[in-house]
Amino acid sequence: MVRRMQPQIDTRIPSEVEKHVYSIYVRMYPDGARAFVPRAFEWVGNCFSGQYGDYQPIDARYHDFEHTLQGTLCLARLLNGRHAAKAKPEIPRKMFELCLLAILFHDTGYLKKRTDSGGTGAKYTPIHVNRSVVFAREFLAPQGYSEAELQIVQNMIRCTGVNVDLRSIPFQSEIEQTLGFALGTGDLLGQMAARDYVDKLPVLYLEFAEAARYDEQGARLNRYTDAEDLMRKTPAFWSNYVWPRINDDFGRLYKFLNEPYPDGPNPYLAAIQRNLDRLQEKLKKK
């Protein structure tokens, strides 16, 4: 039985998330490069704040930088839990680093070029995963990452696609696939467990509505008539999509978040249940 209580981290403060991820990294890899985690956070922070190339600061209000930090924190904790449980195969340091880069860059597809003056980055919702894949390669290739490493990062990012056929992703190894599935798990749980998830659902609806207006096949994003409709359908999204995804497709990797492992309570699942309960109470008052 592995017991570890996670400290409370404010994901609105990038430096707090960075410090916690760094502590996990050096615990897992005492001989790791001390500059890696700060450098990775600096890279992606610059991208989201408009300090990279000809890209604007992020202007999507739901898929903002904090959204990325929520997923990053959850992923790092999950991988730390897996390491503490001595699960096999072990994660090589380089693969951990590539996975961290993948989660940090997984929503860079919402960034707009400076010449792009129409709408917000939310309009790219239907294609943001592919845009993120391209962006990650564009950014990381000049940093000295090899072709094989770039493909690994891209494959992991593809795991965040809502409609992606995971069997179509050309994973080159078992550990690459496991890390991709861990990333997908962290992305889903990190946002749904967030303290303000329920409050931000109307903002998510506005992103979907904007994407539908800009998308040539807008009907595929026109699943919700208004924000309340999205809120009412969120419990079904959890039970019909997220729960099967993290269990059946991603192999129950969320269990490495249990405290203690393997049979203790899962703080992320508990937070999601609280959010769903709060959502139901809110809807009753409408």
Image: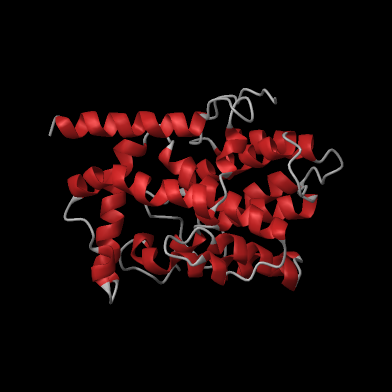
Q: At x 59% / y 24%, what residue is drawn?
A: 7
Q: Quadrant of residue 272?
A: top left
Please state the horizontal and vertical placement of residue 14, each as a whole percent of the image: 56, 39
Q: Is residue 162 above or below residue 262?
A: below
Quadrant position of the N terminus in the picture:
top right
Closer to us: 15 or 92: 92
The residue depicted at 29 percent of the width and 72 percent of the height is: 215
Instruction: Examine the rendered structure and indicate whether residue 228 appears above or below residue 15.
Output: below
Looking at this rendering, what residue extends furthest in the left direction? 286
User: Would you place residue 38 above or below residue 46 in this image?
Assistant: above
Q: Quadrant of the C terminus?
A: top left
Q: Answer left or right for 13 relative to 34.
A: left
Nearest the eye: 64 or 271: 271
Q: Position of residue 232 (x, y in %)?
A: 22, 43
- Is residue 68 at least partly visible in the picture? no
Colouring scheme applied when the structure was drawn = secondary structure
Tell me: 203 left or right of 264. Answer: left
Q: How many marks?
A: 0
Front residue of 195 and 2: 2
Which residue is at a point 66% across and 24% down the rendered structure image?
4
Q: State the image coordinates of residue 86 (x, y, percent, origin top left).
A: 76, 38
Instruction: Tell me the quarter of the picture where residue 138 sits.
Output: bottom right
- Identify the residue at horizontal 24%, vertical 33% (top origin): 280
Instruction: Spot the residue most to the bottom.
Output: 216
User: Is any part of residue 280 visible from this angle?
Assistant: yes
Left or right: 37, with 56 as reference point = right
Q: Position of residue 78 (x, y in %)?
A: 62, 39
Residue 177 vs 41, above or below: the answer is: below
